Every structure is written in structure tokens, then in C-alpha cells.
Amino acid sequence: MPSRLPLLVSAYAMSSFGSYLDMVALGLYALHLTESPLQTGLFMALRVGSGFVAGPVAGRLATRPRRKHLMICADLLAAASLLTLAASPSMELLYGLAVILGAVQSLWGVALRSSVPEIVGQGRRARANSLLVTGRSGAMLLGFAASGVLVTWLGYQTVLVIDALTYLACAAMLAGVPFPRLGATSAEGHEPRRAETGLAALTPVLGAMIALRVADAFGSASHNVALPLYANLIFPGAPAAFAATFTTAWALGSLVTGRWLAGMRDVGGERGFGVATALMSVFFVVAFTGLPIWLLIPVVFAAGAADTYAEVGYTTRLQTIDDAQRAGVFGLAASAQNAGFGLGMVGCAALLEVFEPLPVVAAAHAVALVAALGYLVFAVRKGRARTVEAVR
């Protein structure tokens, strides 16, 4: 494993810890400042919406030679914004922070994923992606666990300062990661080409993969929105403990699978991505059927495992694109996934005003499941067509 990879994984884990910490803490802070669920929802919508808008811009910026500098500047901007809000709390600054964090995290993610082949080499993409997801899963466990405790013990403004420090630490770690010069070679080892837009690189299969990730994001929004309500229904005595158990089981499934995939050379390819996405949707629907806790934990663990398998396979496949086009594709994909997640959040939140969590989660994940089955049929047919062409 290249010596630069552990530091990159550590930087991503630190960035992810900050993201998950502020995901909870800032939502609570918005409710604390406004005492309005509607304005709290607007804060979340602004964050997702800015990520959607920033996706294509991130794709263009990440084609520049200094991806590492972009990522470091993004971390510094996030830290500065958090410190400003901590010094002068106001709802206006909180809304501004939502826009900045959504855009910054979109830029950071696009730059990271499009840089992995240059940092570790094409042959180590799957291992690097698996280790990155493993680091993120561990950070999610710590971020979700620490957020409520830190807010209770230290207060919102101190947590904002701690959150800013995580972004500063990430920037410091990134400074020590040697990024090869962009465009030295293409994904196939040929001379580099001029940077192009993401649309120029989309084959039918890649377009279908991104479309499936959008459907997956739509389905995933449903269980994120429904979990607090479901926790109150199924475990009214301690809903927070139930929700923590649920998210911990998911993160452990992701963590274990990421470590397992790090030792594999093949992560299942295009068909494995489709199968894993379908299984994830099935497991999440089952998790909302009122299972006893001893059965719920392995089901949610399996959902996390399937989710990670799908993500690693998807990211690794997109990284085979020529470097001149790769960042544009990741920017387009990030924007599309944010759109799917945002629509899912709004739609499912409205449905939960009328229906119980199970039918809402089942309906949203049915969209992802049908999309996954359709994608698999398409991928199998394309695979057979390629086989016939090769025989000829």
C-alpha cells in the first residue's frame, strides 16, 4: 500500500467526522435558534440544494492541476464559516453556513474520488476506495455518537469550534499527501487529453449506473427521514437509544465490508453494483417491519454491508474514465445524487404526515429496487452483446 494512502484515509475520516458531527449538531442548533421545524427543514434543504448546484462546478474546478489545493481551501473555508457562526450566532449566518458546507463537501468529494487513480495507481483503486469507506464508517460511528454528548456537555458554540478544528486537521493532513500532477497520464496510460465535461464521457452503462445511484439516494432519504418517527413508535421509552442502535449496526456493516473489500482485487463490477443496491433496499424495508432488536441488528448490518459494496463498486467503475473527463463525471454524479436525496427528503417527509413509516420506506425503496432490477437486465444484455461482438 502506498505510504500516502493511510494519510489520505485519515484526512477523509477526519473530514467525515466533522461532517457527521455538524449534520446532527447544526440541525439541533437550527431548531434551538428558530424553534421552528419548518426553518430547520429549510436549513437542511439549503445544504442539500447547494451540494446539487455545486456538483457541476466542482467537476470543472477539479480538472485544474491543483486538486489538493482546492480541497485544502475548501476545508479552510468550512472552518472559517463555523468559527464565524460560533462567534456571532444568528439564523442568517446559519443559512449561509448551510450553503457553504453543502458546496464545500460536494467539491471535496468530487476532487477526492477523481484523484484516487493518480494517487494510488489504477490497480489499487478498489483497495483505496474500500479503505476510504472504512475510514468514513468509523468516523460516522464517532460523529453520531459524539454529537449529542458534546452538545449536552459543552453547548453549541463550543461544538462549532471543535467541528472547525476537524476541518483544520483534515487540511493539515492533506498538506502531507503528495498528489501527482494532474494529467500526467490518462487512465489507460496514454497521453492526456483536454478536460471535457462529464456528459462527454457518459456511455449507456455509466448513465444507467448514475441513474441507479439517484434512485438509491431517493430510497435512502426515506429511512433517514423516517427513522426518528419509527424510533418513537417502536421504542417510545428510549427512541434515541433505538436510533443509535440502528445507525451503529449500519455503520458496523459498512466498516466490516470496507475492510473485507480492501483485501479483494475484484469488487463485483457493474452487475455486483446492481445486486448490492437491490439487496440494500430489501434489507432497509425489512428493518422497518417491527423486528425484535436481536433480529433488527443483523438486518441493518446487512443493509450497511450491501450499501458499502455498491458504493465501492460504483466509485471504482467511474474511476476507470480518462482523467480529462473523470472529474466532470463525478461532478455530474454528485449533483444527480444530491437531487435524488433532496427530492426523497421532501417527498417522504410529506408522506410521513399521512402514512406510517413502513409504507413510506417501502414505497421509496421500491423505486430503488425496480431501478436496480431494470439496471441488471440492461447490464446483462449489454454484457451479452459485448460477448457476441468479441466472438465475432
Image: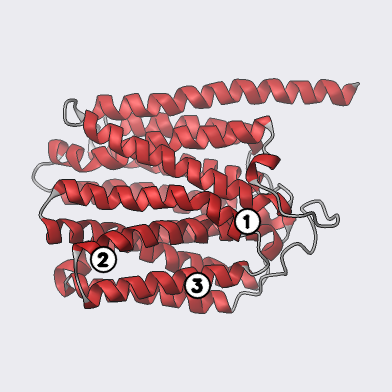
10 Å neighbourhood of mark 1: few (<14), some, or many (≥20)? many
Q: Residue at x 17, y 46 (%)?
A: 38
Residue 167 x %, y %: 41, 72
**143 above or below 239?**
below
Between circles 2 and 3, the one closer to the viewer is 2
What label does residue 114 carry, if any? 1
Disc 2 crowd rating (10 Å Cα; few below 14, some 14-19, many 20+) is some
**Element marked by disc 2:** helix
Instruction: Give percent across and percent down for residue 129.
Output: 58, 55
Q: Residue at x 72, y 69 (%)?
A: 181
Q: Amino acid at mark 1?
A: Ser
Q: CA distance from mark 2 to mark 1?
A: 31 Å
Q: Nearer the viewer, mark 2 or mark 1?
A: 2
How many angstroms separate mark 2 from mark 3 (CA)? 20 Å
Q: Residue 204 appears in which quarter of the rendering?
A: top right
Q: Which mark is residue 73?
A: 3
Position of residue 368 measured from the top left corner of the image (x, y, whole percent): 44, 29
Q: Residue furthest right?
A: 392
Residue of label 2 = 93
**Apparent side of residue 363 relative to residue 264 in the rendered image (left or right):** left
Q: Amino acid at mark 3?
A: Cys
Q: Name the N-terminal-most of marks 1 and 3.
A: 3
Reading the chain from its start, which is encountered first: label 2 or label 1? 2
Distance of mark 1 from mark 3, alpha carbons?
17 Å
Q: Residue at (45%, 70%) from the top-left corner?
A: 75
Residue positioned most to the front: 92
Which amino acid does the dot numbered 2 rest on?
Answer: Leu
First along the sequence among labels 2 and 3: 3
